[in-house]
Amino acid sequence: MQKITTYLWFDNQAEEAAALYTSLFEDSKIVEVHRQGEGGPAMMVAFELAGQRYLALNGGPGHDFSDAISLFVDCEDQEEVDRLWGALTADGGKEGPCGWLTDKYGVSWQIIPKALPRLMSDPDPARAQRAMQAMHTMTKIDVKALEDAARG
């Protein structure tokens, strides 16, 4: 087991959230579910996303998620951005600025294509600035629009 594991507190949707999240990323799985009594509801769910371990607790109401912590996803391309954005904003998720979103459980995510940090750290400061300005106008990151902006 890894030394530090992210622990997520849900009202009563830990198992549902873990099932959604593990369906979205390769090398992901539900590792174990601790139930309240035989056949009872899940109390805690251990799962892995892209090989990274997480724990999800059904702890009841009163401890909401906030943007103060988010899960950053380093996406290969626009296709991956689009797929994850659609799945995580579905059924009540909310789009945020600059590649941020909040899923239907209240967990904040940053869905960021590899092109964004590459363009924003361009050796030409004018190109980098244009890419950053374009990013500030976006919710879901659009790689082609970023590249077009960087080119001027």
Image: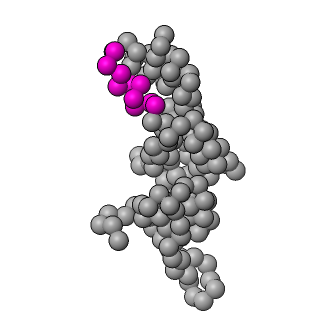
Q: Report x, y in % for residue 64.
A: 50, 56
Q: Is residue 124 magenta?
A: yes
Numbered label tally: 0
Q: Residue at x 47, y 13 (%)?
A: 151
**Left or right side of 81 for 4:** left
The reply to whether residue 19 is in sight is: yes
Q: Report x, y in % for residue 85.
A: 60, 42
**Left or right side of 52 for 27:** right
Q: Residue at x 50, y 40 (%)?
A: 76
Indicate the quadrant where residue 25 lies. bottom right
Q: Residue at x 54, y 31 (%)?
A: 141
Indicate the quadrant where residue 80 lies. top right
**Left or right side of 127 for 23:** right
Q: Nearer the viewer, residue 114 or 72?
A: 114
Q: Report x, y in % for residue 61.
A: 55, 64
**Image coloring type:** one colour
Q: Residue furthest bottom?
A: 38
Q: Is residue 99 magenta?
A: no
Q: Residue at x 56, y 46 (%)?
A: 102
Locate the N terminus and report the quarter of the image it occupies. Answer: bottom left
Looking at the magenta stretch, what is its main secondary structure? helix
Query: What's drawn in magenta, residue-wise?
Result: 115-125
Q: Report x, y in % for residue 24.
A: 59, 55
Q: Residue furthest top?
A: 152
Q: Nearer the viewer, residue 77 or 1?
A: 77
Q: Nearer the viewer, residue 66 or 21?
A: 21
The reply to whether residue 8 is in sight is: no
Q: Nearer the viewer, residue 56 or 144?
A: 144
Is residue 51 placed above or below 101 in the rendered structure? below
